[in-house]
Amino acid sequence: MKKTLTILFVAVLLGGCRNDNHFQAEGGIMEYASHIVVDETPDGFTAQIANPWKKKTLLHSYTFSTVESTDYNYTRNTNTVHIPLKRVVVMTNSLAHLMVELGAEDCIAGVCEPEYISDSLVCARLADGTIADCGNSMYPTVEKIMELKPDAIMVSPFEDSGYGQLEKLGIPLLECADYMETSPLARAEWIRFYGRLYGVAPEADSLFAKVSDDYLSLKEMASKTVSRPRVMLDTRNGSAWYAAGGTSTIGRMIADAGAEYIFADNDNSGSVPLSFEAVFERAQDADVWLLKNSAKGKFTYKLLESDYKPYASFKPFRERNIWVCDVNKVPYFELTSFHPELLLGDFISIFHPEIRSGWYFYHPLDE
């Protein structure tokens, strides 16, 4: 039963690992993002990406140019990369979906972990061989990537972790640290960076403008509500309950939806391992419980209680106010990174059904 409750990518889902880094730079086109600064140049743009784990230091600096291109060397902090990119290997399903949305799907030469991709166009191209399966994102198939001869590899950086053989290929590794942003619009704004890589800057800017306008409109709607339901998240994993910090993406979004997250006063931006007793002390009288389910079968109150009987002691269990997102049935991981307005809409519908109805990802837990 423990496999029923999704624990995958805990740090990512809860808004990134613990960090208090805000990139100390001024200017650029980005308004919300704190881990990247993008500046336009006559022949392209530059991007400086902050190291999310080492305050006030760079992870990487890139010059993207339509004119000049030099040999790439991973050991250099600054590299020049020719744009627009025509063929890339993508490590995350959310970026693959975004590329389709921006009309840049022809640039996808390969993906990692296709079993987590639900986008119909990408799946169709995987089936006919137009897009290659490059294996696991942590241990990609280097030979396949070399065979594809991509212009760049879109990688996800992790603390104190390199990229193994990929560093020696001479292929630009573009470090996609969007998942480390701690506000919903900051992460979504990386749309503008990705659009410039593929020569679709106007489409990217337009998409982000729509996302941000919709998000801010929903936030304004929720700010006018009087009630502030108390919200708890997820379940324990083994002996620990990994609770999202109060400054995590999800913590901030709960506040934007006009509710009170039970750990709002915790200043962590990532997940914090807690005992069941510590969570119960805060959450026993919560009003709403939000869960994610990765099992393919029907998930119910009975199954939740059979996993761990003390769950039945929480008020949302007793009052039947638990909401679940079946991540194998809805494109939660593909959409929420760059479309936080969809998730915010769900939250408002759950917390304040009197002002909004309809859900994209969540539904009431079945009896």
Image (spheres, rainbow, N blue to C red):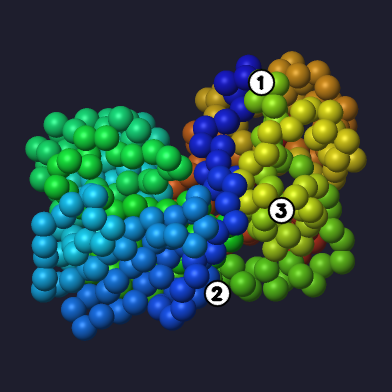
Viewer-nearest of discs 2 and 1: 1
The residue singled out by tag 3 in the image is 267
Q: Position of residue 109 (x, y in %)?
A: 18, 46
> Residue 123: in sight, yes or no?
no
Local secondary structure at mark 1? loop
Label 2 packing within 10 angstroms: few (<14), some (14-19), many (20+): few
Local secondary structure at mark 3? loop
Quarter in which the C terminus is drawn: top right
The residue singled out by tag 1 in the image is 238
Q: Residue furthest bottom?
A: 42
- Marks 3 and 1: CB-CB under 8 Å? no
Residue at image point 68% right, 33% down: 273
Q: Position of residue 60 (x, y in %)?
A: 34, 58
N-terminal of the two: label 3 or label 1?
A: 1
What is the C-alpha distance between the residues marked 2 and 1? 40 Å
**Label total for image:** 3
N-terminal of the two: label 2 or label 1?
A: 2
Q: Amino acid at mark 3?
A: Asp
The residue singled out by tag 2 in the image is 213
